[in-house]
């Protein structure tokens, strides 16, 4: 639901404006807006503009310095009681931290590159040590480190040629992490010229000894590899330690400055929303109605000279008020689905509870399979475990949506007697408790369209209730809902699903209602009614997708035994079930969302509401910033 | 002969609507990809726009099912 708001007006002496804003910022519940009374808006003075510019620049510097520290893995604690810095002092301090973090980041990048390069050589160097320890006399052999960009066949050909030409030699190969093949060749020293010629003919590149090892030959570089790697690791740790020390020394001051600058900028921006006369100021805004007594008491206690009053409800239009949604915990995760569209306007209806009921139900009706429902429940558990610790995080909310969807999928699975298609029926004797979707295609179509009719009638009734302040519109929506029901009854009577005696009276009432609807809502109401009927038919997709889902599952099961061996058939069936499950996750989600956004919301949803953003102290955690009170 | 015409009718219902959906989605998809490159916040609208022409193939499928069931 949308939280009821109250419009509040504060009037006081002009010099008290900063103090009044300070109290409002501490309270953190008033969404400021330009005053509706005809007074001039506060024009920023030259001093205020200069201060705004200084604060914005200093804030940019501080943010950049904190980002630099975070990039080095140094966690900056939020300030406890760090003394506030002036903009100039903070900018100087931030510049110092930025310069140091930039130098540390550059050094860390260089060291990390060197470590990666050395680590790539390490396995080959280990091979070389093994070779040298294997009885080869160092003086008689020359070591060649080679690098290939090709596959094992090239290595085999090279080995054959070396066997043929050189005779005594040792060649070892290893695939490097990047996919290249590194080769280590130990060949007689006297045959070096032959080796180099052979390698040149075979287009094999000789790998250079890493520069970090001081150049020289491979044998000379070998003893320096491990000490250098250890040295690099120590240097990297030293960089992290220095970053942590920097964060400990300057971090709290910078975070305190960030918070203070955000607050000061917000306060300067808020001043521009105030109305002013030569002697007085006026501030207006919205606060959730239930917080109004607390806010008023606080203002009267702190600033008794400032007059605080609630603006009469008839003096403001609902469309001006900001919107904040609140729903019971069971519906809350579904706010993520409604948040994909603009907020509803104040005074209209929050569609979240409807989505929370109908989204899982329609999804379950489409997929309707105990096996797929169990897999969905498994996904819900995984998401829940991943989201542990963040009660309103994305994973947590998705887990709760997945759990609701899984429950309906399992319930409809039992009603349709489906467990991985007809596997439950064939293996465990599972029987449909209500409807066999495999056979009863037409009844399933009727069910889908009937659900669409109920869904849209509910939407029209909701629209009528929401527009109760405008009796003509409310009556029009209500009449459209009634006509939709009558059309359903007429068609059902015509198809002999209901007693045929109902046909004539319902048709007569329909014919009488038609001109009334035109009088209430204009000629376009006819077009809207026809569009709504089209929307009812659109729910046939529930049957189409559901039938396709069950048919694909049955086809998957028939693969067992259709491909020679049972094992291959089972493998194919599993793969096909996996594909069907993936489709069953994606397609119904899109189509059920579409049924909500296009068909259902079209009957009552009034988008375009402003997000409620109370004037409050800044917080580094966006979720902690007051959006809802 | 009836079976032939019924099957052909069902096949035409699904083929025609599938081609129409494919054509519409190809045009919408290209336009939506271009729009998303400039305004990623339009993703919900993009999904809806791409999903809208699927109504044709879904209704085509329903008509095809009705035609086939007419036979029996």
Image (spheres, rainbow, N blue to C red):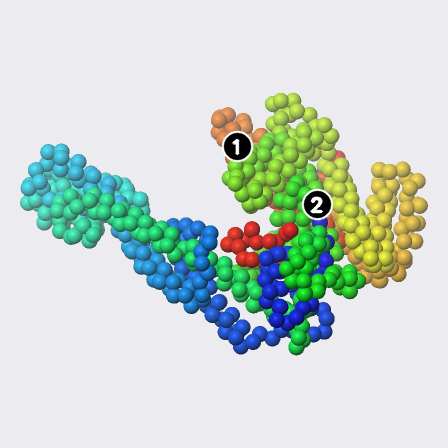
Query: Is tag 2's residue or tag 1's residue first in the polypeptide sequence?
Result: 2
Res A339 visible: yes
Q: Are marks 2 and 1 on the same chain?
A: yes
Q: The residue tagged with tag 2: helix, strand or loop?
A: helix
Q: Nearer the viewer, mark 2 or mark 1?
A: 2
In the rendering, at what x and y percent does residue A217 appear? Answer: 13, 49
Res A61 visible: no
Residue at 62% from the left image edge and 24% from the top image edge = A426
Give the side of residue A322 with respect to residue A189, left or right.
right
Residue at 78% from the left image edge and 62% from the top image edge = A312
Examine the image and state in which quarter residue A121 appears.
Answer: top left
In the rendering, at what x and y percent does residue A550 appear? Answer: 64, 35
Q: The residue tagged with tag 1: helix, strand or loop?
A: helix
In the rendering, at what x and y percent does residue A544 appear? Answer: 68, 42
Residue at 58% from the left image edge and 74% from the top image edge = A44
Give the side of residue A552 with respect to residue A199, left or right.
right
Characterize the local packing of mark 2: few (<14), some (14-19) or many (20 or more) Cα atoms within 10 angstroms. some
Give the labeled residue for mark 2: A353
Examine the image and state in which quarter residue A179 appears.
Answer: top left
Characterize the local packing of mark 1: few (<14), some (14-19) or many (20 or more) Cα atoms within 10 angstroms. some
Give the side of residue A590 with respect to residue A519, left or right.
left
Label 1 lies in what chain?
A
Calculate the distance from the C-alpha at mark 2 to the C-alpha at mark 1.
37 Å
Label 2 lies in what chain?
A
Name the disc covering residue A574, or none: 1
């Amino acid at each position: 639901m949308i939280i009821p708001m109250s419009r509040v007006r504060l009037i006081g002496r002009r010099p008290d404006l900063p103090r009044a804003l300070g109290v409002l910022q501490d309270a953190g519940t008033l969404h400021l807006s330009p005053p509706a009374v005809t007074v001039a808006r506060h024009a920023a003075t030259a001093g205020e503009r200069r201060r705004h510019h200084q604060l914005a620049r200093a804030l940019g510097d501080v943010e950049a310095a904190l980002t630099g520290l975070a990039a080095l893995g140094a966690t900056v604690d939020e300030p406890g009681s760090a003394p506030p810095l002036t903009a100039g002092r903070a900018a100087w301090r931030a510049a110092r931290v930025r310069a140091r973090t930039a130098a540390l980041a550059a050094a860390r990048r260089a060291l990390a590159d060197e470590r990666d390069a050395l680590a790539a050589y390490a396995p080959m160097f280990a091979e070389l040590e093994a070779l040298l320890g294997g009885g080869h006399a160092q003086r008689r052999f020359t070591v060649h480190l080679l690098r290939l960009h090709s596959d094992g066949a090239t290595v085999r050909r090279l080995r054959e040629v070396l066997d043929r030409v050189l005779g005594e030699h040792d060649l070892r190969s290893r695939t490097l992490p990047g996919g290249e093949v590194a080769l280590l060749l130990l060949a007689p020293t006297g045959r070096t010229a032959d080796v180099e010629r052979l390698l040149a003919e075979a287009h094999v590149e000789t790998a250079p000894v890493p520069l970090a090892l001081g150049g020289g030959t491979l044998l000379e570089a070998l003893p320096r590899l491990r000490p250098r790697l250890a040295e690099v690791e120590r240097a990297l740790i030293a960089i992290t330690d220095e970053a942590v020390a920097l964060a400990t020394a300057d971090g709290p001051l910078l975070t305190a400055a960030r918070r203070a600058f955000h607050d000061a900028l917000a306060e300067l921006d808020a001043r521009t929303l105030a109305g002013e006369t030569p002697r007085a100021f006026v501030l207006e805004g919205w606060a959730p109605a239930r917080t109004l007594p607390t806010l008023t008491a606080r203002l009267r206690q702190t600033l008794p000279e400032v007059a605080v009053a609630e603006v009469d409800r008839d003096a403001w239009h609902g469309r001006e008020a900001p919107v904040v949604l609140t729903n019971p915990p069971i519906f809350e995760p579904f706010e993520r689905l409604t948040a994909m569209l603009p907020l509803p306007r104040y005074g209209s209806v929050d569609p979240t509870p409807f989505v929370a009921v109908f989204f899982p139900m329609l999804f379950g009706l489409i997929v309707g399979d105990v096996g797929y429902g169990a897999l969905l429940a498994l996904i819900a558990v995984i998401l829940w475990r991943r989201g542990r610790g963040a009660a309103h995080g994305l994973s947590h909310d998705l887990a709760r949506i997945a759990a609701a969807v899984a429950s309906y999928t399992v319930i409809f699975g039992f009603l349709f007697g489906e467990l991985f298609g007809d596997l439950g029926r064939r293996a465990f004797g599972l029987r449909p408790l209500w409807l066999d979707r495999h056979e009863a295609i037409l009844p399933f179509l009727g069910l889908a369209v009937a659900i669409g009719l109920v869904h849209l009638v509910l939407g029209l009734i909701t629209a009528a209730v929401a527009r109760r302040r405008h009796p003509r519109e409310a009556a029009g929506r209500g009449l459209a809902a009634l006509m939709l029901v009558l059309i359903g009854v007429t068609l059902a009577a015509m198809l002999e699903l209901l007693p045929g005696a109902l046909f004539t009276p319902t048709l007569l009432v329909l014919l009488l209602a038609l001109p009334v609807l035109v009088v209430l809502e204009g000629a376009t109401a006819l077009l809207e009614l026809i569009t709504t009927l089209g929307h009812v038919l659109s729910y046939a997709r529930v049957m189409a997708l559901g039938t396709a889902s069950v048919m694909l599952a049955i086809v998957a099961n028939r693969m067992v035994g259709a491909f020679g061996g049972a094992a291959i058939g089972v493998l194919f069936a599993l793969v096909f079930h996996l594909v069907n499950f993936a489709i069953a996750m994606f397609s119904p989600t899109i189509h059920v969302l579409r049924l909500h956004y296009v068909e259902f919301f079209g009957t009552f949803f009034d988008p375009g509401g402003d997000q409620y953003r109370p004037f409050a102290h800044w917080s580094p955690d966006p979720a902690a910033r007051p959006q809802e009170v | 002969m009836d079976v032939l015409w019924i099957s052909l009718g069902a096949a035409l219902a699904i083929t025609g609507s599938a081609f129409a959906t494919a054509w519409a989605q190809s045009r919408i998809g290209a336009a939506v990809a271009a729009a998303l490159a400039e305004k990623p916040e339009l993703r919900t609208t993009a999904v809806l726009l791409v999903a809208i022409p699927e109504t044709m193939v879904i209704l085509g499928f329903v008509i095809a099912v009705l035609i086939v069931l007419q036979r029996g």
